[in-house]
Amino acid sequence: MGNSIFNSKDITVKIALNFTVLFVALLAGHANAAFVHDYDVGNWHKAVHRGSINTKGAPDSIKLIGSNTLNPRLFKARNQDFTIASMGTGLVTFDWSFRTSDKHGARFDPFGFILNGIFHKLTDNSRKRREHGTFSFEVHKGDVFGFRQRSINSEFGAATTTVSNFSAPVPIPAAIWLMTSSLLGLFGMQRKQKMI
C-alpha cells in the first residue's frame, strides 16, 4: 500500500516537472520570436552610411538597403549595420532574402551577419540578383550581433535584404527558474525517500 501511494506521488512530481519544462520552453520560444520585447527594433543600434534601414515591417521583418550614389567621388565601401547586445546565451536564427539591380549580383553588395565586430558574409559572389536562406549562429550573453548590408563600390544599384523569422536568446525569468528548481528539489527528495 505504501509503495503504491509513493509511486503515485512520484508520478505526479514527474508530470509536474515535465509540464514546467514544457512551459519554460514555450515561454522562452515565444519571448524569442520576432523583433519584440528585449529585441524590439527601438533597442537596436543603427549605423547608416548613405543607405537606410527600414523597420516599418517590424516586428515581423526589417529591411537593410545598401548605399548607391551617382557621385563618383562617393563611390566607396559603405555599411548599413543593425546591431544589439545579446540578452542571453543560445542561438540567433533568421531568414534572409536578398535582391539587387546590380548586374554583378551580390559580389559588390554582400549581406551577412556581424558578431562582435566581425562580418560573416552569407551571400555568394555569383551574378545572381536574388538569393535567400535561413541561418543560425551561437551567441553568449553580452555579445554584440546584428546584420550588415555592405556596399563595396556604392554604384550600379542598391541591394536590399529583408530579415524575417528572427529569434534570439533571452534570459528565463527568475520566477520560472525558482519554480523549476523547487520542483527539481521535490523530485530529488522523492527519489531519496524511495531509496530509503
Image (tube, rainbow, N blue to C red):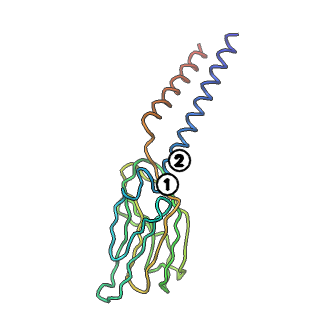
Judging by the rendered image, the residue that carries numbered circle 1 is 167
Q: Find residue 75 and report its horizontal and vertical position in percent.
A: 33, 85
Which residue sits furthest top?
A: 1
Callout 2 secondary element: helix
Judging by the rendered image, the residue that carries numbered circle 2 is 29
Q: Find residue 170 and report its horizontal and vertical position in percent.
A: 44, 47
Could you classify mark 1 by the number of other residues whose Cα lies within 10 Å: few (under 14), some (14-19), or many (20 or more)?
many
Q: Find residue 149 and report its horizontal and vertical position in percent.
A: 42, 72
Could you tell me which quadrant the N terminus lies in? top right
Q: Is residue 29 above or below residue 129?
A: above
Could you classify mark 2 by the number of other residues whose Cα lies within 10 Å: few (under 14), some (14-19), or many (20 or more)?
some
Contact between labelled residues 2 and 1, with CB atoms less than 8 Å apart: yes
Cα–Cα gap, marks 1 and 2: 8 Å
Looking at the picture, tell me which residue is in the foreground, 126 or 76.
Answer: 76
Looking at the picture, tell me which residue is in the foreground, 18 or 164.
Answer: 164
Q: Find residue 59 and report its horizontal and vertical position in percent.
A: 47, 58
* Residue drawn at the location 56% of the way across and 36% of the way down: 21
